[in-house]
Amino acid sequence: MKSMRKSNRERSAEWANDVFDKAPYITLSMVRPDGCPYGLPLSIVRKDDRTFYFHCASEGEKIDCLKTNPIVSLSAVSKCTPKFEEEKENFTEYYHSAIAIGRCEEVVDGSEKIEALRLLCTRFLPKFMGHFESAINRSLDRTSIYKISLIEPPVGKCKP
């Protein structure tokens, strides 16, 4: 009989996805062509348990990095509260954080680009969705969308 209790890994992935959904931005870390690390905080949206999207310009350092090495790391913090614990006379920080590793690729299919942009706009500017179709008509061809497909489940950590 299959256990109804989720494993720690499954619970951790679910919890980590919740952190990604609540974070105001997610840091995308890459490797530059010369091997140096490169990280940027971006507006990234999660489609499902393994798929994330972001939009960007069609050229620049981020694109150079992704062409050289498409493996990326995502990190997010959805809660961060510095605390002084008087009883312990201890400085600490309460936090919720998550990380994930994935493969990044440009989205070229028009319908998937629109789906990704709809997800981004719904998450970050839901009050303006009435303008979505006209914006798509004006700018879809010049907007680059990248998809990150996770290659392992995300993990999260917290200190309540």
Image (cartoon, helix red, strand yellow):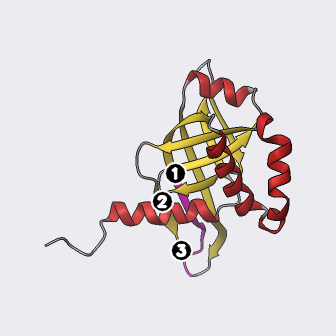
Give the amino acid type for the residue marked by disc 1 in the picture: Ile
Give the amino acid type for the residue marked by disc 3 in the picture: Pro
Residue at 67% of width from left, 23% of height from top? 64
Whole-angstrom CA distance, mark 1 to mark 2, is: 6 Å
Give the amino acid type for the residue marked by disc 2 in the picture: Gly
Residue 4: percent from left, percent from top:
25, 75
Quarter of the image for residue 86 reads bottom right
Residue placed most toward the observer, 92 or 116: 116
Residue placed most toward the observer, 23 or 50: 50
Q: Which residue is mark 1?
A: 99
Foreground disc of the pair 3, 2: 2
Q: Which residue is mark 3?
A: 160
Task: Give the secondary structure at mark 1.
Answer: strand
Question: In this image, 140 relative to 109: left or right?
Answer: right
Q: Residues within 10 Å of mark 3 (few under 14, many from 20)?
A: few
Asked if labels 3 and 1 touch by Cβ distance under 8 angstroms, the answer is no
Which mark is on residue 43? none
Q: Is 55 covered by the magenta stretch?
A: no
Whole-angstrom CA distance, mark 1 to mark 3, is: 18 Å
Residue at 56% of width from left, 55% of height from top? 47
Task: Give the secondary structure at mark 2.
Answer: strand
Q: What is the magenta range?
A: 87-99
Look at the magenta stretch and give its main secondary structure: strand
Question: Can you see residue 36?
Answer: no
Whole-angstrom CA distance, mark 3 to mark 2, is: 13 Å
Question: Can you see residue 48?
Answer: yes
Residue 122: percent from left, percent from top:
72, 62
Q: Is 89 covered by the magenta stretch?
A: yes
Residue 58: percent from left, percent from top:
75, 30
Asked if labels 2 and 1 touch by Cβ distance under 8 angstroms, the answer is yes
Which mark is on residue 156? 2
Q: Is residue 107 above or below residue 99?
A: above
